[in-house]
Image: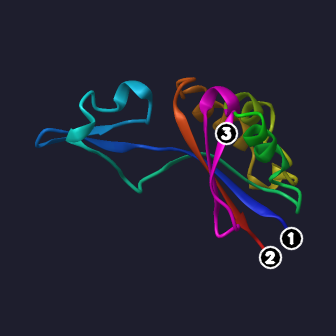
Amino acid sequence: MLGYQIIVSRQPSEVLDGEERKLIDCLTPAAVPKDPSKGFMPTFERHVIASWATDYDGLDWIEDLVKAGKAIRLQGGGWPSLYTATAENLISQIIDGPPRAKDYGSSGVGQQERWSAKAAACSPDEWLLIEAWDES
């Protein structure tokens, strides 16, 4: 195994409120319809906050969050492995430098600053999606 490509993104969604569809910017508890029978329909659009490459041990950090009850594993297997966690549990790690990242300096000057700005825009209770693509 060579490693993983990690992608952290916001999860914009549509909320069905009766017959009306409302687009929301991010998934937070306040965005979920008060009447669940009205429906909740996520979209497949994503807004990437950060993306980086790791070595073979690149999932250790997110698996530690799963063990601590701070993240949820949605799907394993690497094609992709999917996780979700609140921004509160992810943002500081992204701002401080992506966990287990290979040298991300090649991504371009200012990449870390762009990630930090996108990460800081997230509400602490917003659920983010973490994709881990096996690069082997």
Given contact means CB atoms under 8 Å apart, are the residues at marks 1 and 2 in contact?
yes
Q: Residue at x 61, y 31 (%)?
A: 87
Q: Which mark is residue 24?
A: none
- Local secondary structure at mark 3: strand
What is the quadrant of residue 32 in the picture? top left
Question: What residue did someone put label 2 on?
Answer: 136
Q: Which mark is residue 71?
A: 3
- Local secondary structure at mark 1: loop
Position in image of residue 42 (x %, y %)? 37, 49
Of all residues, the one furthest to the bottom in this rendering is 136
Given contact means CB atoms under 8 Å apart, are the residues at marks 1 and 3 in contact?
no
Distance between mark 2 and mark 3 Cα atoms: 25 Å
Give the residue type at disc 1.
Leu
Of all residues, the one furthest to the front in this rendering is 37
Q: Residue at x 77, y 34 (%)?
A: 68
- Local secondary structure at mark 2: loop
Of all residues, the one furthest to the left in this rendering is 19
Residue 131 painted magenta: no
Quadrant location of the C terminus in the rendered image: bottom right
Q: Residue at x 74, y 68 (%)?
A: 134
Give the residue type at disc 3.
Ala
Give the residue type at disc 2.
Ser
Residue 71 painted magenta: yes
